[in-house]
Amino acid sequence: MKPQKIVIVKTGNSFPSIIPVLGNFEDWIARELGQDPQEIQVINVEQHQPLPRLDAVKGVVIAGSHAMVTQNLDWSLELEAWIPKLIQKKVPLLGICYGQAIEASGQDPSQVLDQVVETPVAAMVLNRFGTLASV
């Protein structure tokens, strides 16, 4: 069995003028996770890269996007269908902007929050920034 990875789900790109200076969304996330790059896998769902098997995942961060969940894009619907499986298996899950919106889409928000607050990823965010908030 392959070692488990922290999966960054790429759902779009930052603005073209920002990427050469600061990198793209997945670069920001990988940098702030502070993990060995070998432990991180980026999956570009917008470009239809397949989502990994759950047994290959030790945590998931769903990045931001300029798309909207309500657009019901095919890759977004596939991602939305994957999220309950992550929650059921208690895979640590963090959504940023679009990622948070897709996590809540079609889910009971209280169940999502209860699952997320107890995860190591949430603990890392809480320890680093002192808050875990949803807007």
Image (cartoon, helix red, strand yellow):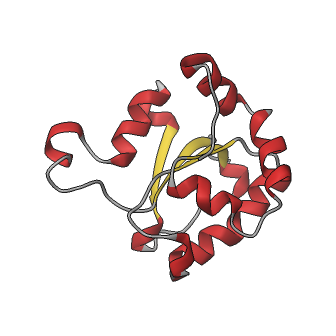
Q: Is residue 100 above or below residue 118?
A: below
The percent position of residue 71, horizontal first and vertical second, equals: 51, 80
Determine the residue positioned at 65% across, 69% down: 80
| Residue 98 or residue 81, whichever sits in front | 98
Q: Is residue 91 left or right of residue 99?
A: right
Number of marks in picture: 0
Q: Is residue 71 left or right of residue 114?
A: left
The percent position of residue 94, horizontal first and vertical second, equals: 62, 43
Determine the residue positioned at 48% across, 70% down: 68
Determine the residue positioned at 49% across, 29% down: 33
Residue 51: quarter of image: bottom right
Q: Is residue 20 above or below residue 70?
A: above
Q: Is residue 60 above or below residue 129?
A: below
Q: Is residue 12 left or right of residue 133?
A: left
The percent position of residue 108, horizontal first and vertical second, equals: 83, 60
Determine the residue positioned at 55% across, 55% down: 99
Residue 28: quarter of image: top left
| Residue 48 or residue 105, whichever sits in front | 105
The percent position of residue 13, horizontal first and vertical second, equals: 32, 58
